[in-house]
């Protein structure tokens, strides 16, 4: 759905740079070419006040746009966000994919398979690139740090290796201390991002991890 991604991204950029306006809702149509040509329907909820606005793209599940999706859009609008509600079934004569995902299966399967770090699959569609970046961003920043320590604790691993906490004279062991995982994977993720926005956010969150390591060193130094 390359055309879909390009159009939606352009729409998000336009909303982020929007001129001052009253809160409102507009309808848009979006042409797509894959998996077959179609025209999709979207609703754009914009907040009042001066832009630029942070923008959220709301996607639906296999049953289509449920009543709670516009409710979320209105809530986001009330909090100062612009919200895009995209109906990816409109114009495709699809009512539901619950139990029958064949019309979109190849691209969906690829995005799911390519998102995994351990799978080592290069994403070939814009959607797969975004999903892969989102998955890797979860491993960085404050959430990534908390997850790394929590998983290590659940596996009975120490936070750091006392003899060489920061892997300066040894190879990091991904099955060893939690801090070792920073050096085997986490600190390298920013260089694997597929999108410009993903890289920027990954670099920001990686800086947080490096700051944590620097603080940790001051606290455990003899």
Image (cartoon, grey):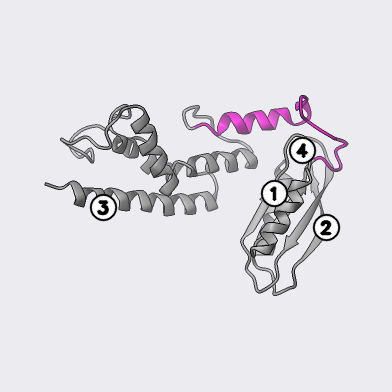
> Which sits earlier in the primary sequence, circle 4 or circle 1?
4
> Which stretch appears magenta?
89-116
Disc with the residue nearer the chain's start (4 vs 2): 2
Q: Position of residue 142 (x, y in %)?
A: 41, 49
Among the two numbered marks 3 and 2 on one chain, the one whose residue lies closer to the N terminus: 2
Question: Between tags 4 and 1, which lies in front?
Answer: 1
Residue 58 numbered mark, or none:
1
- The foreground one among 125 and 101 is 101
SS at mark 2? Answer: strand
Image disc number at residue 215:
3
On residue 85, the disc is none
Q: Rounded to the nearest whole Å, what is the CA distance between mark 4 and mark 1?
A: 20 Å
Question: Looking at the picture, does residue 147 appear above or below residue 25?
Answer: above
Is label 4 in contact with label 3 (beta carbons under 8 Å)? no
Q: Name the residue under label 4.
A: 34
Disc 2: which residue: 27
Secondary element under disc 3, as helix, strand or loop, is helix
- Mark 4 vs mark 3, foreground winner is 3
Q: How far apart are marks 3 and 1 (CA)?
A: 38 Å
Of the residues tagged 3 and 2, which is closer to the observer?
A: 3
1 and 2 marks in contact (CB < 8 Å):
no
Residue 165 locus on image (x, y percent): 21, 39
Residue sticking out furthest to the left: 222
Circles 3 and 1, Cβ within 8 Å, touching? The answer is no
């Amino acid at each position: 759905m390359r055309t879909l991604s390009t159009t939606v991204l352009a729409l998000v950029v336009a909303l982020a740079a929007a001129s001052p306006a009253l809160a409102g809702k507009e309808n848009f149509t979006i042409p797509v070419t894959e998996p077959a040509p179609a025209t999709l329907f979207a609703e754009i909820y914009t907040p009042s006040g001066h832009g630029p606005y942070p923008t959220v793209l709301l996607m639906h599940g296999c049953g289509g746009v449920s009543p709670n999706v516009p409710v979320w859009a209105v809530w986001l609008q009330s909090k100062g966000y612009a919200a895009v509600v995209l109906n990816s079934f409109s114009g495709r004569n699809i009512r539901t994919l619950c139990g029958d995902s064949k019309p979109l299966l190849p691209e969906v399967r690829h995005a799911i398979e390519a998102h995994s770090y351990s799978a080592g699959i290069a994403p070939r569609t814009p959607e797969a690139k975004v999903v892969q970046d989102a998955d890797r961003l979860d491993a960085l920043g404050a959430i990534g740090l908390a997850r790394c320590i929590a998983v290590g604790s659940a596996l009975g691993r120490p936070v750091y290796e006392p003899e060489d906490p920061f892997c300066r004279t040894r190879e990091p062991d991904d099955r060893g201390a939690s801090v070792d995982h920073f050096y085997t994977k986490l600190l390298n993720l920013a260089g694997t991002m597929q999108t410009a926005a993903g890289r920027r956010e990954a670099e920001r969150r990686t800086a947080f991890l490096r700051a944590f390591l620097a603080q940790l060193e001051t606290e455990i130094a003899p």
